[in-house]
Amino acid sequence: MNWMKLTLVIPALLLVLTSADAQQRIGFVDSDAILEKTPEYSTIQQQVNTLAREWETEIDNKRNEVDRLFREYQSRELLYTNEERNRKREEIVRAEEDIERLRIKYFGPEGDLFKQQESLMRPLQEKILAAIEEVAIEEGYDYVFDRKGDFLFMFAREQYDLSERVLAELGIETESSSGS
């Protein structure tokens, strides 16, 4: 988080915490821990990893083909006319450019893998958010923050960690909920 953002967030947070009703309740969740304990998350991760491996294999196969073309060119370079040499070099360069375009299409910042992961995760994120809302309303919390988000807490009382309660709302048994 940059300093400018931090200087805006902290005063706003302090204003919220000290405003009108001094009896406001604040809780937090650890969304990473909730996700890791959610069965759908591992299924989504497996689907995304499988897709990534398929695309990596496709790119590797294309890379091997370009390598084969290059080795062939090198072994026959002296036999080619100048025109044939230029044509073969251009063919290899185009093939390498195609591979790079494909790599960006699949794995770039706005690539297919990112889009696929986002679309698979959206329903799970909405389900978790609904559970957080339900817990917050049922237990009378005014604010619930995500421990991993942009808000950095230097101290948080564990008694206000709603993560286990959210998991229970999602119907997920944890060691601490089954042992009590």
Image (cartoon, rainbow, N blue to C red):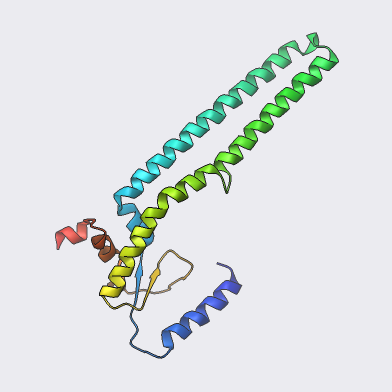
In front: 157, or 131? 131
Residue lying at the far left of the rendered structure: 180
Q: Quadrant of residue 23?
A: bottom left
In front: 7, or 136? 136
Residue in the image at 33% along x and 69% along y = 133
Image position of 117 with respect to 82: above or below: below
Indicate the position of residue 90 as horizontal and vertical percent values: 76, 25
Q: Is residue 111 left or right of residue 118?
A: right
Quadrant showing the N terminus: bottom right
Q: Is residue 161 left or right of residue 50?
A: left
Image position of 59 with respect to 175: above or below: above
Give the total number of marks visible in the rendering: 0
Quadrant showing the C terminus: bottom left
Indicate the position of residue 148 as horizontal and vertical percent values: 43, 63
Residue lying at the far top of the rendered structure: 79
Q: Is residue 168 left or right of residue 88?
A: left
Q: Quadrant of residue 65?
A: top right
Residue lying at the far right of the rendered structure: 82
